Amino acid sequence: MFRSIRSKLVLIYLLLILFAMQLIGVYFVRSVNSYFLGNFSTTINTQARFLSAQLQQYMGKEITNDLAQDINNLIGAFASESEIYVINKNGTIVATTANRSYIGQKRLRPEVTHALSGTKDEVIREDAGSGQRYTFLSVPVKNGSEVIGAVYMVAPMTQIYKTVKEINMMFYTGLVIALVLTAVLGVALAQTITNPIVEITRKANAMAKGDYHQTVVIRSDDEIGQLGEAFNFLVERLRSALFENEQERQKLEAILTHLSDGVIAVDSQRIVLLVNPTAKYLLGCEEDPVGQPLSSILKSETDGDSRLLSGRELQFAGPNGRILQAYGSALRGDQGQAGFAIVIRDVTETEREEQSRRDFIANVSHEIRTPLTTIKSYVEALNSGADEDPSLRKRFLQVIGNETDRIVRMVSELLHLSRMDAGKAQWSYQSTDLVRLLDDVADRFAIQCREREISLYVEAGPNLPQVWADPDKLDQVLDNLVSNAIMHTSARGSIHLAAKVKDDQLEIMVKDTGMGIPAAHLPRIFERFYRVDKARSRSLGGSGLGLSIAKQIIQAHGGKIWLESALQKGTTVFFTLPLAKQEAVG
């Protein structure tokens, strides 16, 4: 039933109207109930309060027949459909608009009790027999602060609920009429949308059977009209496509020209038929290789092209140190194999990354194996009886502890590098006072420098601008650089920390008078696990990861880090940081 768009549109209109009317109906019904019930409650409360005020002059006196008649006349004027009871402070009915036989009886309902205790009470109850609802209202009659009686009213609510019900029926009748009108209008509106679609569908079926001389009449500028225009445009394009087969070669050349991979097509005799520009660039062809043998441009080993055309992968060295990878696939024609298509891809970066990964795994394995071997040998020595000598045991355990600390430190640094490589490191950028950071670093290493007889200086003006950085990460960089400087500086040497503004950036310098680094090692000094003096670095506890971590942290801040050194003349490490914006500082 609802497979057509027309049915779905009509259903949507009906559901929208129904949903909207339901919302309005809920609000309307609640508002009507609230209005009439509130108005009714206000009316009887006003009457009760008025009666309470008027009865004050009667309730404090002895109830005589004349006085009772006056009270009856007073409450009779307000009775209407309500039953009104006048009750003295003992709970005895002294006057009523209901059955006069109730006079002299006690009325001790909860509402009356509340009123006689000085509290107004109002409650709505449903009569179990008739099913009608009544409002029970009791108001105290006071003489000053003393309760001398109560007015008790029983008001039927039948008329109120009848009126509310009639109004609700009027509303729901209007809702049904609105739904019927909506259905009629929805069908009419849906036809204006679906009829053009039906026409386009019929003509599209005709096109599918080969009749390309179909057009639709555009009757509007809306989406349906745009669909008709698109259909007519498609028909026109299909007509043109029937006469454009000769242009396929040019289209293919355009595609091959913009491919990121190199493509070569050869015939069954291995003569080059087609080479795209990417393949020429990768193979370093200065002239057009079309018409030449495949082996003359691949320049691989002797049987390389044979292995390639047999369906196997071929990897060979290209010009400018590139590493190329080629794949061959046979081209089938109407009369069998017509030639081969060869795809060439530059895998230089992939191979370099893979080699870096292998080197990294080898370095990690070697770095962890060395302390583990030391720990194992010392544990075996302790198990062999060395633990009986207190001095040996203490020295062996100290070595084991140092090597364990070294492994823990190395693993922590590897995890830190891994988090930064994965982009999961936590950064807390803020305006940072670098002078304070330099002073803090100098304080932390002051005792260590005094023990090694090394002078530590800090040169930074008090008015240096702040930088936009993570202070904890900068502390880590400075700690690493200063500890390296202390590690490689002999006694009576010096370490100099300085900062200055240069080219709208803050340049920080860590300079020492240590042993220096040979020029051959400088290009690789920031590589992971790279050490200039492996034996000395291991003996001092270095892992070869500190400078690599420092480089990543500085680069993450948008700065640069570099190193200048000469053998036996000391080392200077520089890095830059962006200045904090003025509004960030403020």
Image (cartoon, rainbow, N blue to C red):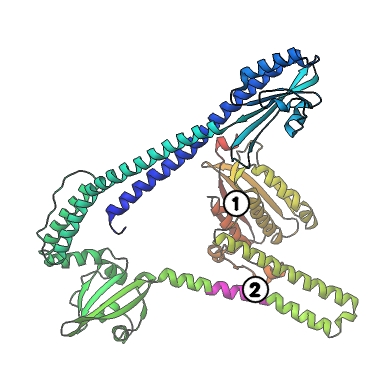
379 to 75, vertically: above or below: below
Task: List the residue tagged with mark 2.
Answer: 367
Q: Percent from the top left, x then y, of residue 55?
A: 72, 16
Q: CA distance from mark 2 to mark 1?
A: 29 Å
Mark sitting earlier along the chain (2/1): 2
Type of amino acid under label 2: Glu
**Residue sitting at x 59%, y 43%:** 467
Q: Is residue 500 magenta?
A: no
Q: State which mark lies toward you, 2 or 1.
A: 1
The magenta region covers 358-369
Viewport quadrant of the C terminus: top right
Q: Quadrant of residue 43?
A: top right
Q: Seen in the image, is 424 located left or right of residue 58?
A: left
Q: Quadrant of residue 108?
A: top right
The 10 Å Cα crowd at callout 1, few under 14, some 14 to 19, many 20 or more, is some
Task: List the residue tagged with mark 1.
Answer: 427
| Disc 1 element | loop
Which of the pair 453/267 is nearer the observer? 267
**Residue sitting at x 70%, y 16%:** 71
**Residue sitting at x 21%, y 54%:** 197
Q: Quadrant of residue 323?
A: bottom left
Type of amino acid under label 1: Trp
| Residue 364 visible to an observer of this rendering | yes
Which of the pair 38/507 is nearer the observer? 38
| Residue 512 visible to an observer of this rendering | no
Which of the pair 520/406 is nearer the observer? 406
Q: Percent from the top left, x then y, of residue 157?
A: 58, 32
Q: Is residue 359 magenta?
A: yes
Viewport quadrant of the N terminus: bottom left
Dominant secondary structure, magenta: helix
Q: Percent from the top left, x then y, of residue 388?
A: 90, 81
